[in-house]
Amino acid sequence: MLVDNPRLTARGPDGTQTGEQPLRVVMGYRGIPEGAAINGDDGKVLHLPTRDPREALDELFSAGVRHLMVEGGSRILSAFLAAGLVDELIVYLAPTLLGSGTPALEDLGITTLADAQRWEWDPASGGAVQVLGRDLRLHLRPATYTSSASTPLRASAGTAAGGI
């Protein structure tokens, strides 16, 4: 958040805000800087001083949130995936090779192929694979979805980076 200063608002193709805006939530111990773009002017921003995805989901559930999209870097995406709290992945891939940089995911604690997370194509919401100009949008769901009574709220995770 400190590097790219995101707005996390719903916007139309021309970049202008559209309709009702989502609650924007920031996880982490640092507070949200006063001039950060995420603050917007609608007051719909919340800071959760935790790095624990389950703790964050419990707090959001208590606040009435029943669906969320996780937009973040490799640390936050990996934390939600490792905790088994993601029921949908939307991955954007561009035909661009960098050769170095920040990976899309950090270590998920998976050491064998037998323990790998398995995902399958999800034809909902526009299809499993969409061509968007030169980019691809992949829509995936866990190969075996099991609901947990201790997890009342699950998350969708999205990433703009490839290499998953």
Image (cartoon, rainbow, N blue to C red):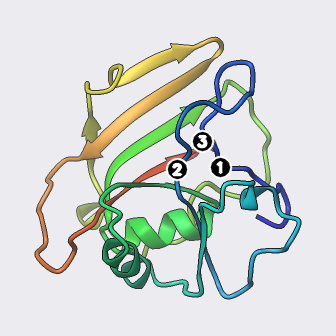
Residue at position x 75%, y 52% in the image: 6
Q: Earlier in the sequence, mark 3 or mark 1?
A: 1
Residue 121: where, in percent of width, then height?
A: 28, 32
Residue neighbourhood size for the residue with mark 2, other residues' Cα within 10 Å, grouped as few (<14), some (14–19), many (≥20)? few
Q: Earlier in the sequence, mark 1 or mark 2?
A: 1
Image quadrant assignment for residue 74: bottom right
Residue 135: where, in percent of width, then height?
A: 61, 21
- Amino acid at circle 2: Pro
Position of 8 with respect to 164 (left or right) is right
Mark 3 or 1: in front is 1
Spatial CA distance of label 3 from label 1 is: 20 Å
Q: Which mark is residue 22?
A: 2
The residue closer to the viewer here, 38 or 19, is 19
Spatial CA distance of label 2 from label 3 is: 26 Å
Q: Which residue is mark 1?
A: 8
- Amino acid at circle 1: Leu
Residue 87: where, in percent of width, then height?
A: 28, 53
> CB under 8 Å between callouts 1 and 2?
yes
- Amino acid at circle 3: Gly
**96 versus 132 height, above or below:** below
